[in-house]
C-alpha cells in the first residue's frame, strides 16, 4: 500500500512539473516574445549573412521595436507563399520582411502605417539588349511566387505578351537563373535589386520603366488591434527619437523611413 501511495505521489509531482513548465512556456511566448515571420533570403530587409546569422534592415528595426515594447523579437523563417496562413494560425505574431500593403492583403491582415516606399522593377543582365518594358515581349521572366512582383506584372499590359512567367520560392533562385541564362529578366523589389547591384555592379541593370510603386507595412493578425496599437506606438517613437533613421542609414546610406 505504501509503495502504491509513493508511486501516486511521484506521478503527481511529475505531472505538476510538466504542466508547470508547459504553462510557463506559453506565458513566456505570449508576454515576452514577438514571433516574426520572415523570408530569410530577402536582402537587405532580412537575410542570412556569411555566418548564417539573420541580419537586415527589418531585423534591426524589429529588434528596436521589440525592445521599445518590452518584448523580445524571435525571427521565424517561413514559406512566403503561406505567410498569411502562418499569421492566422497563430504560429507567428507578425509578418515583417518587405511586406507590401495591398487591398487584397488588407482583407486578410491588419497593417501598420507604411514605413518604407518601394517599387516593382524589372532587372536583366548588364549586357542584355532589353531596355523598356515592351522589350519583354516573347521573353522568359521570373519572379517570387505569391509576391507583390506577381501582382504588379499581372496588372501590366506587357504580361499578355511575355512568353513564359516562371515562379520561384525566393528572389535568390530567380536571380541565379537570370545569371545562368535560363531567364531573360526578373521582376523584383527595387530595394532588393539595388542592394544586389551594390555587390555585383557589373552584373545587372534595371529597365527604364518600373511596374508599380508600393509601400511596406507590418502585418498583424485580424482581431488583434491591441498588438497593432502597441506596435504602431513603438514605431512612431523610434521615428521621433531618430533610431529608425539611424538603422536606415546603416542599410541604405540614407534615411528612407516614412514619418
Image (cartoon, rainbow, N blue to C red):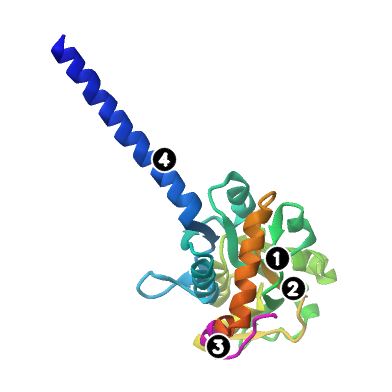
C-beta proximity under 8 Å, tags 2 and 3: no
Find residue 23 and name its label: 4
Q: Position of residue 250 (x, y in %)?
A: 51, 86
* Tag of residue 89: none
Q: Is residue 254 magenta?
A: yes
Q: Residues within 10 Å of mark 2 (few under 14, many from 20)?
A: some
Give whichever of 57, 20 is nearer the camera: 20
Which residue is at a point 58% across and 58% down the rendered structure image?
A: 94
Quadrant holding the C terminus: bottom right
Residues at badges 3 and 1 in contact (C-beta under 8 Å)? no
Dot 2 or dot 3, earlier in sequence: 2
Left or right of residue 240: residue 30: left
Report the span colored magenta.
Answer: 246-259
Q: Residues within 10 Å of mark 3 (few under 14, many from 20)?
A: some
Among numbered discs 1 and 2, the one appearing first in the sequence = 1
Could you tell which of marks 3 and 1 lies nearer the N-terminus? 1
Image quadrant in which you'd find residue 134: bottom right
**Mark pair 4, 1: CA separation:** 39 Å
- Is 10 colored magenta in this rendering? no
Q: Secondary structure at mark 3?
A: helix
The residue identified by callout 2 is 214
Residue at (50, 50) in percent of width and height: 30
Give the structural element (helix, strand or loop) at label 2: strand
Q: Quadrant of the N terminus?
A: top left
Q: Is 121 left, or right, of 144 in this rendering?
A: right
Q: Nearer the viewer, residue 147 or 75?
A: 75
* Residue carrying label 3: 249
Q: Looking at the picture, tell me which residue is in the foreground, 97 or 255.
A: 255
Single out the mark in the foreground, 4 or 2: 4
Q: Is residue 229 above or below residue 114?
A: above
Label 1, residues with CA under 10 Å away: few <14, some 14-19, many ≥20: many
Amino acid at each position: 500500500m505504501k509503495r502504491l501511495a509513493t508511486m501516486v505521489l511521484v506521478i503527481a509531482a511529475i505531472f505538476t512539473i510538466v504542466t508547470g513548465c508547459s504553462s510557463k512556456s506559453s506565458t513566456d511566448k505570449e508576454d515576452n516574445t514577438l514571433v516574426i515571420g520572415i523570408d530569410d533570403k530577402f536582402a537587405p530587409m532580412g537575410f542570412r549573412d556569411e555566418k548564417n546569422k539573420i541580419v537586415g534592415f527589418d531585423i534591426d528595426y524589429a529588434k528596436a521595436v521589440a525592445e521599445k515594447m518590452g518584448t523580445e523579437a524571435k525571427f521565424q523563417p517561413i514559406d512566403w507563399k503561406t505567410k498569411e496562413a502562418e499569421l492566422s494560425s497563430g504560429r507567428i505574431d507578425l509578418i515583417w520582411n518587405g511586406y507590401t500593403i495591398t487591398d487584397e492583403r488588407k482583407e486578410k491582415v491588419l497593417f501598420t502605417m507604411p514605413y518604407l516606399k518601394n517599387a516593382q522593377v524589372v532587372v536583366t543582365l548588364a549586357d542584355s539588349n532589353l531596355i523598356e518594358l515592351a522589350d519583354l515581349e516573347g521573353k522568359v521572366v521570373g519572379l517570387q511566387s505569391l509576391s507583390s512582383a506577381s501582382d504588379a506584372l499581372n496588372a501590366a499590359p506587357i504580361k499578355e505578351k511575355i512568353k513564359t512567367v516562371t515562379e520561384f520560392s525566393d528572389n535568390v533562385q530567380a536571380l541565379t537563373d537570370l545569371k545562368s541564362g535560363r531567364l531573360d529578366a526578373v521582376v523584383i523589389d527595387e530595394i532588393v535589386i539595388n542592394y544586389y547591384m551594390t555587390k555585383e555592379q557589373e552584373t545587372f541593370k534595371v529597365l527604364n520603366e518600373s511596374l508599380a510603386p508600393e509601400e511596406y507595412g507590418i502585418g498583424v493578425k485580424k482581431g488583434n488591434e491591441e498588438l497593432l496599437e502597441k506596435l504602431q506606438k513603438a514605431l512612431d517613437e523610434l521615428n521621433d527619437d531618430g533610431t529608425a533613421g539611424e538603422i536606415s542609414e546603416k542599410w541604405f546610406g540614407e534615411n528612407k523611413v516614412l514619418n
